[in-house]
Amino acid sequence: MTPAATTRLYRAFFCTLALSLMLQPGPAAADCAPHIASVMAARDSGQGRPVDGWQPVTLPDDWSLRWPGHDGSVWYRLQLQRPCAGTAPASALVIHYLIMAGEVFINDSLLWRDRHLTEPLSRSWNSPRYWVLPETTGAKAEDIVWVRVAGVAAQTPGLGRVSVGHQDAMLALYQRELWRTRTLSVINLTVSAVLGTLALFVWLAFPAHRMFGYYALTSICWVLFGLNTLATEAWPFPSTEAVARANHLAYILFIASFCVFTWRLLALRHPDWLEKGLGMLGLAALGMILLVPGWGPLRLAGHLGTLILLLNILYVIGQALRRRQPEDYVVAVTFLLLITIAVRDLLVLAGMLKSDYVLTPYTCLLFMVMAAVLLGVRVARSSRRIERFNQELSDAVDQACTDLSRTLEKEHQLAINNSRLQERLQLAHDLHDGLGGQIVRSIMVIEQRDTPLQNDRFLSMLKLLRDDLRQVIDSGASATAAAPATPAEWAAPLRYRFANLCDALGINLAWQVPETWQTPPSALQCLLLARLAEEALTNVVKHSQAHQARVTLQQHEHALVLRVEDDGIGFDVEALQGASLGIGLDSMRARAERMGGTLTLHSCPGATVLEARLPLQDR
Amino acid sequence: MDTAPPLTGEPTLPSPVLIVEDDPLIRRRLERILRQVGYHPDMLCHAASLAEARQHQAAQSTALALVDLGLPDGNGTALIAELRAADPTMGILVISAWSTEDAIMAALRAGATGYLLKERDDLEVSLSIRSVLRGGAPIDPFIARRLIGELYRAPPVSEDATLSAREGEVLLLVADGLSNREIAERLHISRYTVESHVKHIYRKLAVSSRVRAISEARSRGLLDG
């Protein structure tokens, strides 16, 4: 703020106050009201109160206008008049502020003194003071208030407004000033600090929420900057100038973080050079503050920061209005309010609007709260989005599970169909190899005969076909192309069936099969061996009239040997060709040979041996 | 040796016998075998369909029934279940054509006391019938294996359906292919006892199936309780 502006500002304050004071007391009381008759100022020579060099001044006073470059102390002499002393209510004195440190005497007695009147100076620039004046002695209705102010030329040093009046009015004035200068700051900074700390912890816990980080940074810079309004001592800084530098530093950092925060909050897209340029400007300001000695550059950096801040606010308003999103409107409205309040306060200060108070100190609070609300809304929205996402995710998982099980089901069905197809192929193959071949053979046997076939031969042929068919059905029904796990399992069905038959017919049938396979035969070989055994045993049961019969399965190194022997009546092997008995055996021999095996038959009364040998393939 | 001598030592043959078979050829064959076993033609009745069989059953009780599975008006398994429900002691034989194990098992579950494979020679068919008449029941290793899985190894569904240790032994030996005589020797019991065990096993299979059916019906809410 330029000195001229400052003057205007305080003049405006003075006018409003004067107005209010004129309105308060009635005309009669006005005559009795204590008032300041004159104010004089003189530079301190270091020898107590100056004797000469007094000049009349008006309060608030900025001595740097009168004595440019004067760092040190200035004495102020205020002449108080209390016309109705003794009868009127007690009088009180309010010093609105003084820059920087000071001491106050009434007549010759010390009323109050700052702790440090030499560097580092105490800071009373934002602290109103209030004293009830002692009753005047005797008839003297005039008091002199001496105020010594210590300050530096660059910081508009001098005595601020001073008010005297009746105690109650002054107390009210003091409290109003106290609220405006200190309490409001405390509230402002406390709220900012609390919100900033919350945001900081949110950001620490969720670094992805960068917005909270920017908010925390902005708040902290604001609090650091604002502490200046509450500090009453320069500590921990060594001088008033150091305090000013630190304060400017915090100000520039605040503006920088504020700019970045507002851009991110609105997710503004702007050219890179803009941000970079602003960053360079900020760095330049910081450099000026930190590195260039003297007050001039410091003040320049401050003004630069203020300019950036105002431009950014206008820029953000423009962008927000352009985008027409509800949240952006909130930001735009808030910022417009900020600007409006600033303009209004300027008008008030310029005396063009009549008001007792300014609103600007509230605006930063307004912004902080608005930003916090926006952040809260965003968090709520994103957590709702996450909830919705979770719901969608779990729906998607359910869907995927359903799809998967459907696919598996389909694959399973496909596998079943495949295995059915495989079975049918196998069945067709079996029919072709066994039954089909046998039918062709039977046809040929009948065709090549000159004489009609006898019934029993027909029957034999048909029964052979039947047994073949039964085997195809059984092996198909088992649905496994695997060979039986053990020889006993291979033998079991035949063994049980013929054992019961032989029991009924008085034939003693014995089985000799090994415990385990040495080289497991193929399923096809097992089937053929079973058919062979069945055919041989059928012959034994039907024709042999044997008392003893034996089935032996032997495992040789490269062959599997099945022997069926009985002690029956036997038959002429040569004469068997073409007989009904021979049809089955002929067929079996042909099949064994197709599989690379042999079938031999020896028979004489009392000893018939059928031996089948199938080669085993090493696997 | 397609024929066997008539049964001797049979005090009385259970009669009348109901043959439920729609194919006249097969029916005549069965009648012939039954006559060889010792039946008089008067003791044999026949039905060509489920409806006729039910009619006959309503008019006259039956001691032994031979039931074909594929009948013109339905599956014989249903008839077996009805006959079993009407008379728990009746002998019921399934006449199976080229049927698979599953069809035979279904008939046994419905309450059949045995089965005949109709493609087998007369001798074997008559052996099966004789076995039933002796109070036993025909069985094969593949059926034994199925029964072991269903009754012996599976957790019992009820007291009535639990196999005794001896019944389990019989099943295991049948599955290994031993004849009834061999089993009898192995277990030091008579052949008739072996056959009677098989009959009991079939009965337990039917009980087990019924219990399962009831509990299934309950679990689906088709039955109260």
Image (cartoon, coloured by chain):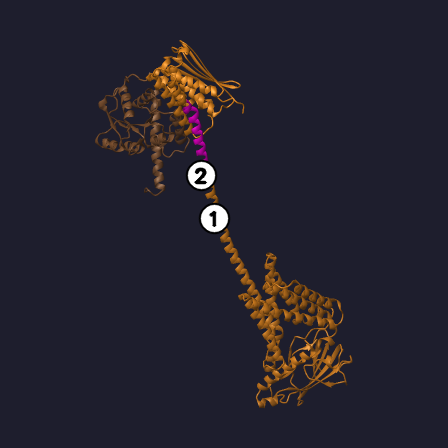
Chain colours: A orange, B brown
- Mark toward the start of the polypeptide (2 vs 1): 1
Nearer to the camera, B97 or B177: B97
Give me the C-alpha separation between circle 2 and circle 1.
21 Å
Output the chain of dot 2. Answer: A
Pointer 1 indicates a residue of which chain? A
Determine crowd level at label 1: few under 14, some 14-19, many 20+ residues with C-alpha closer than 10 A.
few
Residue appearing at x 49%, y 48% in the figure = A397
Q: Is residue A175 visible?
A: no
Amino acid type at image mark 1: Gln
Does residue B206 sit above or below A390 in this rendering? Answer: above
- Kind of element beneath mark 1: helix
Report the label total.
2
The residue tagged 2 is A413
Decide whether the magenta segment is chiefly helix, strand or loop: helix
Q: Horizontally, is A601 left or right of B111 in the view?
A: right
Residue that label 1 marks: A399
| Residue A259 circle label | none
In this rendering, the answer to whether B5 lies above or below A332 is above
**Helix, strand or loop under label 2:** helix
